[in-house]
Amino acid sequence: MTILVTGGAGFIGSNFVIDWLDQHDEPIINIDKLTYAGNLNNLSSLESNESHVFVKGDIGDTALLKDLFSRYKPRAIINFAAESHVDRSIHRPEDFMQTNIIGTYRLLECAKEYWQSLPTDEQSAFRFLHVSTDEVYGSLAADAAAFSEIHRYEPNSPYSASKASSDHLVRAFHHTYGLPVLTTNCSNNYGPYQFPEKLIPLVIHNALALKALPIYGDGLQIRDWLYVSDHCSAIRAVLERGYCGEVYNVGGLNEKANIEIVHTLCDILDELRPVGADSDIYSYRDLITYVKDRPGHDRRYAIDASKIEKELNWRPAKTVEMGIRKTVEWYLDNADWVEQVISGEYRQWVERQYA
């Protein structure tokens, strides 16, 4: 049997592929468009692994998808492919509409056609697992209950609106055509291989370069922080034991304000890579700089992950303190990876975004 993974060279996707092949013999067909956040270097440890087949391609390419289904006959599809950065969606929303909405639609159409061609027993076993975000639910007040799976959708950015649209398409293909789908909505992921425009890798990179650590607004925006390997284990649990047509929220059970995360990062860096004696600063905290808040910045996200715990016996294994330390250690040990992904285009983006 075979699993088809889309977006498997990105941050979460590559971690999933690596973890899967470390624990399973079942091959993975990995399709990724290799846009700015997709990086084959993430998968360098799999170069000699015959169970990993990489295909450069777009989930909007119907002919390619049909060929992959015909050749490899996957028993499941896990859809990570997405444009995923809120800030970029504010500047260039059309890319998000194309990939997250049109791309998901075309993937669903091809999956439906393939699924309908399968023998009855293989149809019953087939799964389409769509990986989504808690941002589709909107923003929470400080005293509001965490997002459950029945919380109404209130997306506030072009990114979250595009992901909400894709979630609705997945639901519609299940209820209209019977396609056996599963959806996960996760909280803020962090860990190895995360593109350094997101908060944690950005802070690590800038701190080591003794550059300003830009913090939006007052830094008190609250997120639920989910270590990426915990997210991968949740996806495996949903694929294996989830009920068709259901949605599962995946959270880290770690609500922290952005500024708390930055302080923790600085303190760990002070311990593991102290500032030099000839520096103008005493601690990496001295580099914290507050910048203008981004438009429509949601104030709080929080995930109620009780459903996945009760139904599938899944809980995150990492506290945020454990996960952040492991993340810092990984970035310190993999400085070459960081340098390879930080292109001129990336530098220009950072300069524009935090001007």
Image: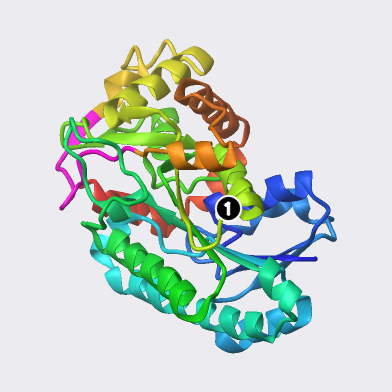
Residue at image location 43% in from the left, 38% down from the top = 305
In this rendered view, identify the residue nearer to me: 188 or 197.
Answer: 188
Question: Residue sitting at 54 percent across and 60 percent down?
Answer: 38
Main SS of residues in magenta: loop
Question: Does the image show residue 60?
Answer: no
Q: Residue 247 is drawn in which quadrant?
A: bottom left
Region in magenta: 289-302
Residue designated by label 1: 242
Rendering quarter of residue 126: bottom right
Q: Residue 348 appears in which quarter of the rendering?
A: bottom left
> Which residue does the image show at 44% across and 74% down from the upper left?
175
262 up-or-down from 347: above or below: above
Q: Is residue 103 above or below residue 151?
A: below
Residue type, label 1: Gly
Q: Position of residue 192 (x, y in %)?
A: 56, 40
Q: Is residue 97 above or below residue 232?
A: below
Report the label total: 1
